[in-house]
């Protein structure tokens, strides 16, 4: 797991480091690392044409010092100054000395560049570019682009990008992973994120970026002493006559997600029975009558009185519950159903479901998920590109896997079933949700490799995804 930090935390650590170190040392470390990364991206530094986009803050200073190093190695380096009067003075001197050429910002000067270095705005940046900075971002669009610290136009805390932002191939980020580089549009706009260690002393953080090794460490593996019950039994209260497929997908995902046994008490048992003979179907039982270690409730359940009664029964049990889809809509009407639970609850809203249960998520998705988790006393998995999982105590995980192809009907049902299987294995709720999001994202990527995937295709890749994660 890699720690994710806020801009305020990074600024505090930077000012501590600056108090200890000679003046300018931090920026030199940043610029050195940046120039090394830029050089590695060029076939050859000597003779390469590099264009720097230089803002009026320290982000521009980093770009100028790095550009000076590349110019000293024989690159032809042009710096386009957004605001010549405010360009970093020492950086400009170093750049001049290395025979770099500074110009007023003109998008036409980007033509033919081998590499663009985006040093317009860093952690001082706001979401969205306008005017000449937007024109420069447009002109750089099809060129190999390295963002300095954060792509310009991306809010370094939230990842929000407003209208226009730089789309980088590589982002060289300094000292810490800022939340805006792994969340929201920022996660995508960064391209490949490369962290440079500046020797900052960062505070312990409760936000984490998941890695494959974290998932490997928690995925359940049956031992010699296990039987189907000790591995964990999942109960499914999903599917209805109208939405039978959702029940089938969520159930299938629990089956392939590693549960020892799956029991079904939903409202459309026949298709589940037909598709998954290994599932134990209890057509006339209520949740309290069957023994499980975790419940999945909601996908395709409907929102009528029967669905509400089934949901209330599930939530009145004392085992972990993952509530999705229609269950979220129903819980939004009666939040006390989950507030008073003794066992953990996970809810997995997309934005519209989140809005029903906790108001608009807004641009700060990490803060929104944390607020809802604290308020509801539940683990909240807020879906989207870079899914966020927040626990009631504020611990949060950001998932880096997945693909926009996952935005297909039923793919959320696959996620629910997998979370259920991991909860039943005894994994703590926030980790179960986060590990499931990671594996679901990998399954989505595998499924998308063969062409546009359906939710059934994602489900079909789940075993492969879990297998490859388990073995590394
Ligand atoms: N501290 C250190 O020692 C180290 C710092 N380092 C580097 O410093 C960077 C932070 O530098 P920084 O604080 O100077 O802010 P930076 O991001 O350059 O620019 C802020 C300026 O831009 C403007 N502006 C912002 N967004 C805008 C927009 N969308 N559209 C238009 N204007 C916009 C904003 O204007 P304002 O909001 O004030 O009106 C303000 O004037 C950091 O990311 C790292 O690269 C490293 O060298 C390591 C050592
Ligand atoms: N733009 C996107 N990029 C990456 N993943 C996405 C994007 N949009 C949605 N997803 C993922 O697709 C899945 C969709 O789930 P959901 O909306 O619940 O679908 P359904 O209700 O049809 O099953 C979630 O895992 C979500 O994180
Ligand atoms: K930048």
Image (spheres, rainbow, N blue to C red):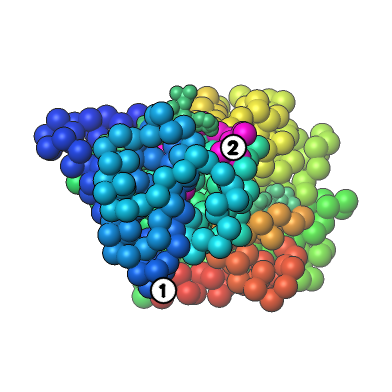
Give the left or right position of residue 129, taking residue 103 as reference.
Answer: right
Q: Which residues are magenta?
A: 118-134
Residue 126, image x, y percentages: 51, 31
Find disc 1 in the rendering and name its residue: 43
At a point 74% along the width and 57% down the height, the residue shown is 408
Rendered view: 297 above or below 469: above
Neighbour tally class for label 2: few under 14, some 14-19, many 20 plus, Cα within 10 Å: few
**Residue found 37% across the figure and 47% down from its top:** 63
Foreground pick, 461 / 64? 64
Query: Is disc 1 in contact with disc 2, using a CB cutoff of under 8 Å?
Result: no
Residue 147, relative to residue 222: is it above or below? above
Residue 260 image offset from top left, x and y in percent: 53, 66
Q: Is 472 located above or below residue 16 in the figure?
A: below
Tag on residue 135? none
Asked whether residue 129 is drawn in magenta, I would say yes
Determine whether 100 is above or below 363 in the image: below
Q: Is residue 385 magenta?
A: no
Residue 433 as seen in the image, left or right of residue 252 = left
Most prominent secondary structure in the magenta stretch?
loop
Residue at (77%, 49%) from the top-left corner?
300
- Disc on the earlier residue, 1 or 2: 1
Task: Please give the residue where the numbered disc 2 appears in the rendered image.
Answer: 132
Can residue 446 be seen from the camera position used here?
yes
User: Left of 39 or right of it: where is 116?
Assistant: right
Query: Mark 1 near ligand 3 (CB under 8 Å)?
Result: no
């Amino acid at each position: 797991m890699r720690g994710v930090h806020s801009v305020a935390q990074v600024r505090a650590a930077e000012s501590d480091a600056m108090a200890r170190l000679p003046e300018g040392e931090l920026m030199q470390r940043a610029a050195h690392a940046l120039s090394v990364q830029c050089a590695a991206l060029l076939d050859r530094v000597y003779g390469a044409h590099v264009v720097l986009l230089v803002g009026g803050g320290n982000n521009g200073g980093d770009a100028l010092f790095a550009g000076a190093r590349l110019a000293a190695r024989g690159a032809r380096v042009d710096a386009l100054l957004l605001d010549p009067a405010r360009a970093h003075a020492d950086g400009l001197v170093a750049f001049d000395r290395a025979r770099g050429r500074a110009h007023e910002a003109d998008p036409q000067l980007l033509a033919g560049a081998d590499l663009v270095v985006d040093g317009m705005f860093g952690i001082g940046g706001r979401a969205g570019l306008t005017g000449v900075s937007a024109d420069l971002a447009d002109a750089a669009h099809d060129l190999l682009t390295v963002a300095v610290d954060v792509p310009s136009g991306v809010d370094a805390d939230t990842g929000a990008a407003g209208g226009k932002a730089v789309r980088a191939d590589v982002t060289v980020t300094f000292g810490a992973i800022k939340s805006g580089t792994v969340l929201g549009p920022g996660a995508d706009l960064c391209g490949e994120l490369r962290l440079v260690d500046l020797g900052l002393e960062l505070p312990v953080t409760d936000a984490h970026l998941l890695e494959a090794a974290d998932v490997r460490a928690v995925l359940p593996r049956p031992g010699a002493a296990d039987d189907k019950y000790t591995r964990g039994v999942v109960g499914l209260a999903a599917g209805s006559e109208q939405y039978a497929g959702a029940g089938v997908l969520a159930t299938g995902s629990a089956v392939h997600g590693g549960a020892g046994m799956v029991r079904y008490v939903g409202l459309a048992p026949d298709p589940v029975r037909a598709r998954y003979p290994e599932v134990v179907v209890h057509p006339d039982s209520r949740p309290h009558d069957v023994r499980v270690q975790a419940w999945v409730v909601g996908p395709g359940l409907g929102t009528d009185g029967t669905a509400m009664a089934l949901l209330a029964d599930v939530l009145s049990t004392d085992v972990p519950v993952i509530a999705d889809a229609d269950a979220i809509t129903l819980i939004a009407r009666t939040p006390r159903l989950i507030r008073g639970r003794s066992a953990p609850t996970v809810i997995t809203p997309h934005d519209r479901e989140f809005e029903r249960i906790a108001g608009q998520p807004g641009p700060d998705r990490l803060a929104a998920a944390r607020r809802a988790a604290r308020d509801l006393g539940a683990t909240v998995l807020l879906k989207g590109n870079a899914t966020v999982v927040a626990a009631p105590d504020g611990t949060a995980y950001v998932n880096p896997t997945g693909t926009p192809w996952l935005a297909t009907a039923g793919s959320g049902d696959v996620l629910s079933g997998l979370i259920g299987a991991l909860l039943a294995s005894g994994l703590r709720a926030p980790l179960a949700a986060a590990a499931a999001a990671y594996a679901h994202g990998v399954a989505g990527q595998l499924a998308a490799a063969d062409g546009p995937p359906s939710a059934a295709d994602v489900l079909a890749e789940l075993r492969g995804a879990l297998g490859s994660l388990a073995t590394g």
